[in-house]
Image (tube, rainbow, N blue to C red):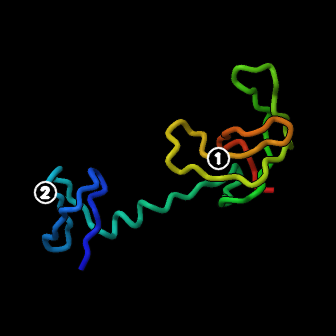
Amino acid sequence: MSLPNCPKCNSEYTYTDGDLLICPECSHEWKESEIKAEDTIIIKDSNGNILSDGDTVTVIKDLKIKGSSSVVKVGTKAKNIRLLPDANDGHDIDCKVDGFGPMKLKSEFVKKA
């Protein structure tokens, strides 16, 4: 049986103790079922619809572009989005906005088209 690597330090020397998996290098303990549940991060739009890669979204609020005098107006479409579940700054959508080019958006300011 092949055991998964440690999710904290990626060590390959994990071992089991009952139903726990333990890493001898960083002393991290976890259950395999907990890791699988954490891997699925769901990103929703402003209306609560679940977004997925490749969707088309519409901007619901005028958004100022940092470092520019331009504004992305309400109703502007962003096609073929890519979700960024590990984004720590809140910008969890990577897309190409019509008339502006590639940019990152927050899911709270878009709705699924």
Q: What residue type is labelled 2?
A: Pro
Helix, strand or loop at disc 2? loop
Above or below, 86 relative to 38? above
The mark total stands at: 2
Position of residue 111 in the picture relative to residue 48 (left or right): right
Residue drawn at x 73%, y 40% is: 102
Q: In which quarter of the image is the C terminus?
A: bottom right
Residue position marked by numbered label 1 in the rendering: 93
Rendering quarter of residue 22: bottom left
Residue 104 bears which disc, if any? none
Image coordinates of residue 36 in percent, x first then y, are 39, 67
Rendering quarter of residue 55: bottom right
Above or below, 110 relative to 43? above
Residue drawn at x 76%, y 55% is: 112
Between 89 and 102, the one nearer to me in the picture: 102
Q: Nearer the viewer's eye, disc 1 or disc 2?
A: 2
Residue ranking furthest to the bottom: 1
Between 3 and 21, the one nearer to me in the picture: 3
Residue drawn at x 86%, y 37% is: 99
| Label 1 crowd bin: few (<14), some (14–19), many (20+), radius 10 Å | many
Q: Distance between the residues labelled 1 and 2?
A: 37 Å
Residue position marked by numbered label 2 in the rendering: 24
Question: In the rendered structure, which disc, 1 or 2, sits on the residue that comes first in sequence?
Answer: 2
Position of residue 12 in the picture relative to residue 68 (left or right): left
Residue drawn at x 28%, y 51% is: 8
Image coordinates of residue 27 in percent, x first then y, are 15, 53
Between 69 and 63, the one nearer to me in the picture: 69
Image coordinates of residue 72 in percent, x first then y, are 81, 33
Image coordinates of residue 96 in percent, x first then y, are 76, 44
Position of residue 107 in the picture relative to residue 99 (left or right): left
Helix, strand or loop at disc 1? strand
